[in-house]
Image: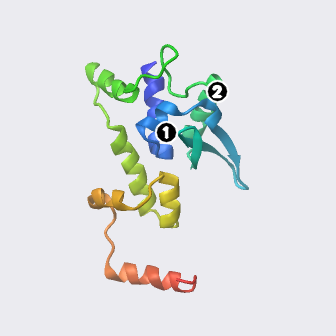
Amino acid sequence: MLRAQLLTILDLTTGAGLSSQEIRHLRGSDISPLELAERTVVQIAVRKRGVVSRVVPVVCPVRGHRLLTRAREVGSGFVFPIVGETMPRNAICHVSEELVEQGFPGFNAAALRNRWVVKLASGPGVPAAMLMKMAGIADLRVLHDLEADLPKFSPEDEAQALLHCEGEDF
């Protein structure tokens, strides 16, 4: 079960940027295929207080396949593998602790999510508004804490980017 739990955490944090709390509440019915012209990807409906607050695509085919398979297995049940019917409050932390007990390195789910945010923020073609929507963040202050991990841009790089946007009602 530890392997399934770890893969679920990794797929949802590094593939869709979900937080520990969002992983704990995710149901199989929240995962579905999304047909694009080029290929099929997976979409994750993230809920807050039972209402879908955002939908995040998972474009990695391997992660997407695992998530769709898991969703089919559990139906409307929890995606995160548990024993019993109730989701433990610190289920995600327990996986890291169990890995450490077995002699493996632990992990920090928040740090994995942050890496996903940095990757989005650093990638070309991802507007700030899209980043904020996919990550479920109200402002970009989260990037301040991750500043050391962001790419370094010269004034020339920044000027070129602004000139590129100039023709787009900037």
Q: Could you tell me which residue is drawn at 34 percent across and 60 percent down? A: 141
Circle 2 is placed at which residue position?
76
Q: Which quadrant of the structure image shows residue 21?
A: top left
* Secondary structure at numbered mark 2: loop
**In the displayed structure image, the side of residue 1 where residue 77 appears, left or right:** right
Report how far apart the C-alphas of labels 1 and 2 lie in the structure.
17 Å
The crowd level at tag 1 (other Cα within 10 Å; few <14, some 14-19, many 20+) is: many
Relative to 89, does residue 62 appear above or below in the rendering?
below
For badge 2, the amino acid type reads Ser
Q: Residue furthest top?
A: 84
Asked if residue 149 lies left or right of residue 85, the reply is left
Local packing at callout 2 (Cα closer than 10 Å; few below 14, some 14-19, many 20+) is some
Classify mark 1: helix, strand or loop: helix
Give the mark toward the camera: 1 or 2.
Answer: 2
Picture coordinates of residue 65 (x, y %)?
61, 36
| Residue 75 position by quadrant | top right
Specify which label sits upstream in the sequence, 1 or 2: 1
Q: Position of residue 101 (x, y in %)?
A: 26, 19
Residue type at mark 1: give it. Leu
Residue 143 vertical placement versus 167 (above, below) = above
Tell me if residue 69 comes above or below residue 31 in the rendering.
above
Residue of label 1: 12
Closer to us: 118 or 23: 23
